[in-house]
Image (cartoon, grey):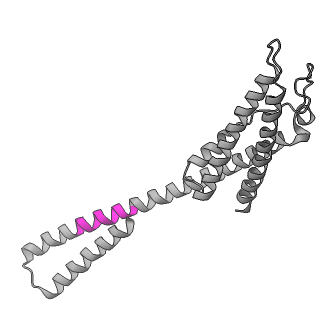
Amino acid sequence: MKFRFTVLALALLAIWSFVLHWFPIPDKWMNWGHTAVSAVASILLGLMAAIYVYEYQKSDAENEKRAQLKILLLAELKSTVESLTISDIRYFKDRQGIAPNLPHDIFYENIQPLILEEAGRTNLFETEKSAQMLRLARLMRTYNSEVGNIHSLIFLRVPGYNPQALVDIIGKQIELMRQKILAETNLLQKGLEKK
């Protein structure tokens, strides 16, 4: 856009110089012509300068926001990896023996992809990385839903109801999702740390 204004202003000045040089113009029209051309050229060059300053400030603000989001995003991804690593997960005692086949009696935690979703929705990162962020956030939300389901089943108190089969199935799904989230998170982390 600023390039157009520059070209327009320079073209106007070139045409006016050409007209002055090759065509005789009476003095009365000469003063008016100089004033008109000067005014239009000044307006165009002023618009060009304003657009240039605006774009410079906008790109500077975007770079700063991108750097801040990158720091927050890396912290969130690190936290996600820590909370999903088996050694860092809190355990619970299954007092009723409802879920004996769950790996290590894991107490599954919810993970919140708030910064991941915000970073994915802004246009500050490349399209591929933004899509990867949103896919990972969707996977985390699905994981949270399954965690809620398994907690409901484990602590369900209905006489004569044994949720063992469902708990085993959902536990396996959660484990697969956990591994997929860890792989995606590590991949995204490496991609962000590269730049």
Name the residue: 79% across, 32% down.
Answer: 109
Q: Nearer the viewer, residue 36 or 122?
A: 122
Report the magenta stretch's main SS. helix
Q: Which is more toward the observer, 26 or 146?
A: 146
- Position in image of residue 135 (x %, y %): 64, 48
Q: Quadrant of residue 51?
A: bottom left
In this rendering, the answer to whether 81 lies above or below 148 is below
Return the residue nearer the eye: 149 or 29: 149
Q: Is residue 160 left or right of residue 134?
A: right
x then y, percent, for residue 136: 68, 47
Quarter of the image where one finds residue 138:
top right
Instruction: Kindly identify the residue that appears in the image at 93 percent across and 35 percent down.
Output: 104
Residue 115 % position (x, y): 66, 42
- Horizontally, residue 134 falls left or right of residue 187, namely left
Q: Is residue 65 above or below residue 88?
A: below
Q: Position of residue 150 (x, y in %)?
A: 78, 28
> Which quadrant is the C terminus positioned in?
bottom right
Farthest-out residue, bottom: 22
Q: Is residue 63 above or below residue 143?
A: below
Q: Residue at x 91, y 40 (%)?
A: 87
Give the quarter of the figure containing the N terminus: bottom left
With 73 as the anchor, is 20 left or right in this view?
left
Please report the residue visible at 53 percent of the width from the left and 58 percent of the height from the top: 59
- The residues colored magenta run 38-49
Residue 54 appears anywhere in the view:
yes
Looking at the image, which residue sits at the far top?
159
